Image (tube, rainbow, N blue to C red):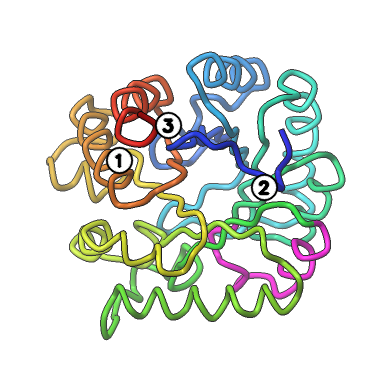
Amino acid sequence: MNANSLPPATPLIMAILNYTSDSFYDGGYYHTPDKFFARAQQCVLDGAHILDIGVASSRPGAPLIDPKKEWELIHPLLIEIKKLFPDVLISIDTYNSYTAEKCIENGADIINDISGGTFDNKMYDVVATSHVYYVLMHTSDIPEKMQSKTNYNNVISDIQSLIKEKINFLHQKGCSNIIIDPGFGFGKTIQQNYEILKNLDAFQLLHKPLMVGISRKSMIYKTLNVTPDHNDTLFGTVILNTIAILKGAKILRVHDVKETKILAKVLYPLFFM
């Protein structure tokens, strides 16, 4: 696949591949190479279009990772994933320009930046010169502080304005392959997350592919009064992802690929028949 042209499927399924010990849902599940690569293979078999590799948790309260340490962890994973799945798009979940540049040099197709360029001022230069796809996500601050910064005049228009400003800046640098993500759970209350989902179609006005990452997040499991790994949380995720697709989401970033693929098949006639 060519990262300069995203596959036409709606939705595209981005599988979360966490090589972490402390992610909120699957931290520690795949924290050995054998388990990680087995997880990647299952995601591809289940229908993932994109594999999103991350080695640092971005859960609320998580510390930032050192770029060189991050690259040291990602490098062998990326090399092997590229060998195993040459026809699958590879995304790197990083906010560090050093890591992004190294990964792009080694075949990464997408840089998924939870900070939208705010944690590392060199990130825009890296993605602009490489022409890979760049996921521009909104957050209010670093993970350690973001949930203490949830005050907005209007959560929709404020986020939309900030993303638009960054899109314009990226365009000036020559980067046009931009995917936008409103950042569910990143500096938002549960109520604000639902407000964003309710008005998700407003982000189509930015004329960029829209990615949604709500898989098993607290807006679901806290509303249901269960845990992230509870089956009700999965059921809630599928329901909210259905709404996201109908409101314009092009990419769903998920833990549960098989169930999302079923959702995509059921909704397929609405888009292509």
Is label 3 in a helix, a strand or a loop?
loop
Q: Taking 191 as reference, is 50 above or below it?
A: above
The furthest residue to the front: 273
- Write the residue at 59% across / 38% down: 52
Q: Taking 122 as reference, is 245 above or below it?
A: above
Which quadrant of the structure image shows residue 45? Answer: top right
Q: Taking 161 as reference, is 39 above or below it?
A: above
- Write the residue at 31% across / 60% down: 201
Q: Separation of disc 2 and disc 1 at Cα?
A: 22 Å
Is label 1 in a helix, a strand or a loop?
helix
- Give the residue pinned by disc 2: 110
- Give the residue pinned by disc 3: 255
- Write the residue at 50% across / 54% down: 209
Q: Is residue 118 left or right of residue 162?
A: right
Q: Is residue 121 magenta?
A: yes
Q: Amino acid at mark 2?
A: Ile
Magenta region: 113-130
Q: Amino acid at mark 3?
A: His
Nearest to the eye among marks 3 and 2: give it: 2
- Write the residue at 61% across / 42% down: 6
